[in-house]
Image (cartoon, rainbow, N blue to C red):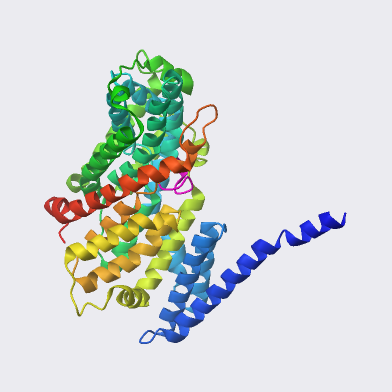
Amino acid sequence: MQATTAVKAAGPSGPVLRYAALAAAAVAVSAGLVLGAGGLGMTGRITLAVFAVATLLWMFTPIDDTFVALAAGLVLITAGALEAEVLFGSLGDPTIWLLICAFVLAAGVSRTGLATRAAAFFVAGARTVRQLAHLTTAALVASAFAIPATSGRAALALPVFLALAATLRERRRVVLALALIFPAVILLSAVATLIGAGAHLITAEMLAQATGERIGFVQWLLLGTPLALVSSHLAAEVVLLMTTTREDRRSPVSIRAEDVGEAAGIRVTGPLTEHQQRSAALLAVVVVLWCSEPLHGVSPAVVALVGAIVSCSPWLGTVRMGDSLKTVPWSMLLFMAATMAMGAALTTTGAAAWLAGGLFGDGERAVPAWLFLGTVVVVSALAHLVLQSRSARSSVLVPLVVAAAVGAGVSPAAAAFASTAAAGFCLTLPSSAKPVALFHQVEGVATYTSRDLLRISSVLAPLIVALVLAFALYVWPLLGLPL
């Protein structure tokens, strides 16, 4: 009895001490920034302190990210560093509405089974393991244009993986390769579209607040799609080379579309159902209107809203409005709204410029553009080791990168886009991203271990960093994003 009591008494001491140490560190950092930020007004100092404490909480505690962001916004309002209308008004931002309506549209597509049917069509054409890997990659890249957020795409792709794993269960190395390819491609291909990740919307909005320059849906598509294609197929090839033998890669495979459909509980052969035809037509119209915005001038958010209403309408729709709204990640949207408001406070109070000057210099000694961008890309790619939330990484990095880019003589838009693209690499740990965690433990299928992730990341991370830097220096300037 005494031993049990002692264990209970000692149990909480670890977490209590850890939180006490973190609280002391937060107080020390806050006091240091408030008292030592010379040349910065009091509201700027308070903003820096709040920003630092929020970052510490995101990094080192299990406290919900959204709770931290909203609490930080409240402190900034109370301190006079942020107008209440900015925080509340950010929920009405067109980027927030674009994401809401995109999730509603995606719910309609998912309900009909159209996405699974398309994936089955892709993989059924494979004749060798290498073809299977790259056709799977192509299908996953294509899903970025229809399904917002990486976690939603991972959930839809899981039944496809289960069907492939069941068919190839005797080929352990091939199943391992596919288990790694699915989350890697889902994460790397998200950069193709503005709605591919919430972090993209945060980047676009913070850039617009800081500089007045906005990367729209079409421009993001033009810049991101080539990188998504190259990085995704590069990742697939690297995984294949590191996990399979030459005989594995050349060995024939026979994947039936029916097997994929059976695993997902969806009929994938025969003519399209009426609901699938409606969903395919609606999705095609919405994507075309998104891509042709410069011609008709209608905002992507308005196009998405029209599509969402049609998708849920009693006559032409494929899903009920109530059911589709349940798929919207409201917590993530609140997080985005709060962090966009924090970014506005960092910019308007001068805190971001002060902090960027301290970290990267004040611009008196110019550094080469490639060196500045290289630093940004490397830091952004490694940030997932301390900040697991992709949106949190953009919330922390983008205001600093934009402010530093001005001092370095580099286009803030180019620096912010490169940072966000590099931050899409998050494969090192099972906890680095939701898709990685989802495919790490799949019931009935042996997938990858933490050691497998570390081994793949040790090779893939430098390649992705070099690829993003090459795009920033040589490709994106040709596509309208100069340095």
Residue 251, position as x, y percentages in the image: 30, 19
Residue at 40% over, 85% down: 41
In magenta, the rendered stretch is 428-435
Would you place residue 5 above or below residue 363 in this image?
Answer: above
Taking depth in this image into account, of 84 and 235 the one nearest to the observer is: 235
Residue 68, position as x, y percentages in the image: 53, 63
Is any atom of residue 444 visible in this view?
yes
Residue 234, position as x, y percentages in the image: 26, 39
| Quarter in which the N terminus is drawn | bottom right
Left or right, 124 with reference to 73: left
| Quarter in which the C terminus is drawn | bottom left
Magenta: main secondary structure: loop
- Can you tell which quarter of the image residue 360 is in? bottom left
So how many labels did they put on this image? Answer: 0
Taking depth in this image into account, of 14 and 293 the one nearest to the observer is: 14
- Can you tell which quarter of the image residue 27 is in? bottom right
Residue 325, position as x, y percentages in the image: 49, 41
